[in-house]
Image (cartoon, rainbow, N blue to C red):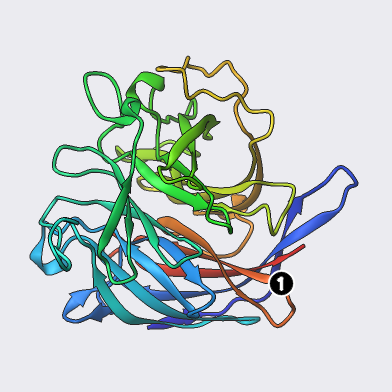
Amino acid sequence: MRKAMLGMLAVLLACGAAGLAAEIRFLGELTIPTGLWAYQDMPVGEISGLAYSPDLGLYYAINDNRGRDPEEGVAGRLYTLAIGVGPNGISGVRVQNMILLDSDPAAPGVQPYGPGEVDAEEVVLTPDGRLIISSERDLENRPWIRIFSPEGEMLGEIPVPEKFMPGEEVGVRRNLAFEAMAITPDGKTLFVTTEQALAQDGPICTTDHGTTVRIIQYDLSGEVPTVVAEYAYVTEPIFASPLDTYADNGVTAMLYIKHVLPEYDLLVVERAYVSGVGNDIKVFGVVLAGAEDVKDLPALPFPFTGSAVEKTLLLRISAIPEYSDIPVEPDNIEAICLGPTLPSGNPSLILASDNNYNPYQRNLFLAFEIVP
């Protein structure tokens, strides 16, 4: 395990009409190389979502491996992590437990998912200790959002609007579905978004234009979760032309932040990758007020001509050093969460990467302090 501690850096956030500013202050990074992290004879990695429990002082980390390669472990794994976060960054990351998710609520106990049956991407924690987990696809490429106990038992399912289900020129694209979720502290509102546009809502991202994704807003306060709104969010274009053949950009993580930074509703992470260049990570502050509710529109125009959510770039971590706000080589960042309160009284913010079990990638954890 290798830890790189970098000096204090402050990333200014544009805030408020009065010209006030807050800071996202970089504290440090911790890297665990691919192949050097294991638990119960399975490799640990592919961290795609994080949720922090202040009561337990631990993090729930979802693994998005589909279980098709026996050497990479089984599908549907959730880890509990102890992450040491302090003013000097991250002192360590340790797996405390591994939980297998339940695929059949009708059968007693946990019935694990088989190969390819789940592609879990995000986890959020409710105030009563339940876990809401999203999957990009099952064997039929259908996304889902399900509720689990801390022991992994399936407790229920959150309905997904039919327009998101894959079909002929409609619905989510393969492997570009529910990458990001966020929940309010009272547990009454859930936000979910796709990585890139639905087939009927326009093309995927290119170097010339972004892609338009829908942010779904659910009301969880009643007996049945209900969609109350959908908002259009337009990503940035891909940041560079590929030197080889592949490039993409999409939404990979999201966090409710209004109780910490009242000027924004959400933090949204856009993760770009360009072959031969590397990753480019952008964190935006997002305001929903003023955005058009598009839930009754079966398809969106492209380019989107309505009122999309307002977004402000707060942090950038780029493989191109002159673009980057901190001197860290980024990796495939797919997780964001608030961490513990620091000795200063300010909250910490954690970002983590999905290493894809690729020997050329790494498990990267980044710690920041939010200074209101």
- Residue 372 drawn at (x, y percent): 77, 62
Residue 341 percent coordinates (x, y): 65, 76
Crowd tier of the residue under label 1, counting other residues whose Cα lies within 10 Å: few below 14, some 14–19, many 20 or above: some
Task: Give left or right: position of 368 versus 261.
Answer: left
Image height of 48 relative to 55, above or below: above
Nearest the eye: 139 or 222 = 222
Q: Position of residue 144 (x, y in %)?
A: 29, 44
Please identify the residue farthest to the front as the structure is shown.
223
For the point 38% across and 47% down, which residue is it? 179
Mark yes or no: residue 47 visible.
yes
Quadrant housing residue 250:
top left
Q: Is residue 95 left or right of residue 24?
A: left
Viewer-proximal residue, 208 or 67?
67
Q: How many marks?
A: 1
User: Is any part of residue 202 visible from this angle?
Assistant: no
Percent of width and height locating residue 198: 36, 27
Tell me the residue at 15%/50% (across/down): 117
The amino acid type, in three-letter code, at marker 1 is Asn
Is residue 309 or residue 37 the one in the foreground? 309
Q: Which residue is mark 1?
A: 346
Residue that lies at the very extreme toward the right in this rendered image: 18
* Quarter that holds the N terminus: bottom left
Tell me: residue 312, above or below residue 309: below
Label 1 sits on a secondary structure element that is: loop
In this image, 5 relative to 369: left or right? Answer: left
Q: Is residue 295 above or below residue 54?
A: above
Residue at screen point 21% across, 51% down = 118
In the image, is residue 38 above or below residue 78?
A: below
